[in-house]
Image (cartoon, grey):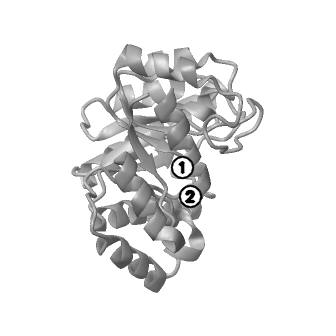
Amino acid sequence: MKGRWSIIPDISDMDRCLSLSQEYNTAFEYNDFFWPYVYEDKDETDKRIRFYEDLDRDKTRDTLHGVFYDIAMISTDSVIRKRSRELVEQSMDIASRLNCKGVVFHTGRLAGLDTDEYNRIWLDGMSEYMSELSDKYKDIHIYIENTFEKSPKPIVDLVNNLKGHNNVYICLDYAHACLTDTDPGEWYDAFSPYIGHMHINDHDMKSDLHLATGDGKINYNEFKDLVLRYGTDVNMLIEVNGYDKIKHSLEYLKAL
């Protein structure tokens, strides 16, 4: 299977990450900067940015995973909402410094809450804030990732509300989609006009285990067929950590 792969770089094992990246022509998706121990420490943040900037590699396809732990961008609590938005914009600013193509954000939806009132509040609030964020950072793509949603509808409704913003896309997390009762093909079909990025890994169809591709029960032959059907030419992050799991995943996907 051919793909435009991305991998998560390990700052403590960079030589081997660079070797894999060169062999498979992968981009990087930085996962350092959603950790509080990094983003709350300006010196540590700056040190990591300088380290990545100094690497001799093509960075034009690189992305960054934005903050998501305890983030509530549309919280009704003004203090929580303000802090969440500060951290979201910090992620965007870091991405700008690294010249990243885009930033991935979770939806911030409460898992399992699917009432009409909540869906309306979430959709209105996210539409307004994502519009503001898109206007402020016009040169950076914003990728909205499916997380706890049971169906594609909430995110499709959101991006439809943001059609005038040319830098807002969907990040299809295929492994997350495979944990729902909605067929993965339905997710792909609904998201296909808006996909700008993807996340893939493997699991047991019960928990989000982030196994190497091929080490779980996700049907990646079906995934390959969907990619071929829709022809989505986007970066696909192999969302696993560690050299061995990344290499195993790349070898598995290449052999499909």
Q: Secondary structure at mark 2?
A: helix
Q: Mark 2 — residue?
A: 243
On residue 197, which mark appears?
Answer: none
Q: What is the count of numbered marks?
A: 2
Residue 179 to residue 97: above or below: above
In the picture, measured across the screen, residue 133 lies left or right of residue 185, that is left
Quadrant for residue 15, please give it. Answer: bottom left
Give the image location of residue 217, x and y in percent. 71, 28
Q: Residue at image x 56%, y 42%?
A: 249
Q: Nearer the viewer, residue 5 or 255?
A: 255
- Quadrant of the rendered structure where residue 97 is? bottom left
Disc 1 is placed on an element classified as helix
**Nearer the observer, 192 or 19:** 19
Residue 225 on image: x %, y %: 47, 16
Residue depicted at 55% across the width and 17% down the height: 222
Find residue 218 and report its horizontal and vertical position in percent. 65, 27
Residue 247 numbered mark, or none: 1
Instruction: Name the residue at 46% across, 69% down.
Output: 14
Residue 237, compared with residue 162, is above or below; it is below
Image x and y of residue 180, in percent: 68, 25
